[in-house]
Amino acid sequence: MSLSSRPLTTLLAGATALSGATAAFAASDSKELNLYSSRHYDTDERLYSDFTEATGITINRIEGNADELIARMKAEGVNSPADVLITVDTSRLTRAKDSGVLQSIDSDVLEERVPSNLQDSDNNWFAFSQRARIIFYNKAEVQDPPMDYLSLADPKYKGMVCHRSSSNVYSQTLLASVIENHGAEAAKDWAAGMVANFARDPEGGDTDQLRGIVSGQCDISVANTYYFARALRTDVKGLSADIDQVGWIFPAQDAEGAHMNLSGGGVAAYAPNRENAIAFLEYLSSDQAQQYFSAGNDEFPAVEGVALSESVAKLGEFKADDVNLSDVAKNLPEAQKIFNQVGWK
């Protein structure tokens, strides 16, 4: 899959998937949807209000940490009021599936709209937005930046690399994808090389990895694109003022392509408003909702052909890794084992 940087355009509100959501609502007597979400973005409010306006379904939200929400749903069991779980990263969606808090659904709309590699193999979850996990570097200090993930472990970058901790889901999924694309042995060598090249012990979030470049703490880092695009669009303290110092590389463009993180959701195992839940997921795949993900939170749409926001388009065109994320998720236990073996804190 190739992601292009076309300019943002106005799309008609009555997209196919949104019409499907309205049709699904017609088959339900309920006018409520109980949403458990670990997304905490103010811009998502537009998603919820537009869905309610189109369908008459009121969204009741419980927001919190993803692991806490999954544990809550599991504890609630058959009495859980949850209809939909929305969270970030393949690892958390897989954790929800493995915990038995999601159910398989059949939806022609989702099958048609969401690329197969961005769906759970058993239709327990679907992706609705993406973030590319790419390499950033200090343009003044690094003349030959690493062009792929494996090159980050090259000894010539010793003492130059910042990265998040091994407990972070982004780190876990990236290593799981390296296992899928290159094998466990190569992945272990890569992780050991990364540890050897760290400028400091892993700490902080993705924005902190980018701040590390402008502050001189490190010369190379790895972060998701939407943190950088946000700093292009708005004022992010400790980053935006000096953002011209930072260059970026979409890794492995001659090979598998850039690793993609996702935001996605699924229908709760005991959803009391199941039809409304499916309708909501179908709405999230509509052109209208997909554009909100890009314009409101600097993410890449999951659905192909949807125009990008200006901040995201500035990053340029690139080849995305189209590896099946369900396959990547199977490597998460091995990834954690490797982290422990190589001493990645």
Image (spheres, rainbow, N blue to C red):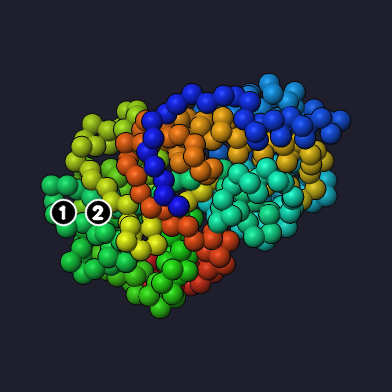
**Residue under circle 2?**
220
Q: Are marks 2 and 1 in contact (CB under 8 Å)?
A: yes
Quarter holding residue 324: bottom right
- Quadrant into which the C terminus falls: bottom left
For marks 2 and 1, the one nearer the N-term is 1
Mark 1: amino acid? Val
Q: Residue furthest bottom?
A: 185
The CA distance from mark 2 to mark 1 is 8 Å
Q: Is residue 100 visible?
A: yes
Look at the numbered disc 1 and give the secondary structure of its residue: loop
The numbered dot on residue 142 is: 1
**Relative to 295, does residue 74 appear above or below in the rendering?**
below
x, y (%) of residue 142? 16, 53
Nearer the observer, 36 or 129: 129
**Residue at (39% x, 62% y) in the render:** 256
x, y (%) of residue 4? 39, 42
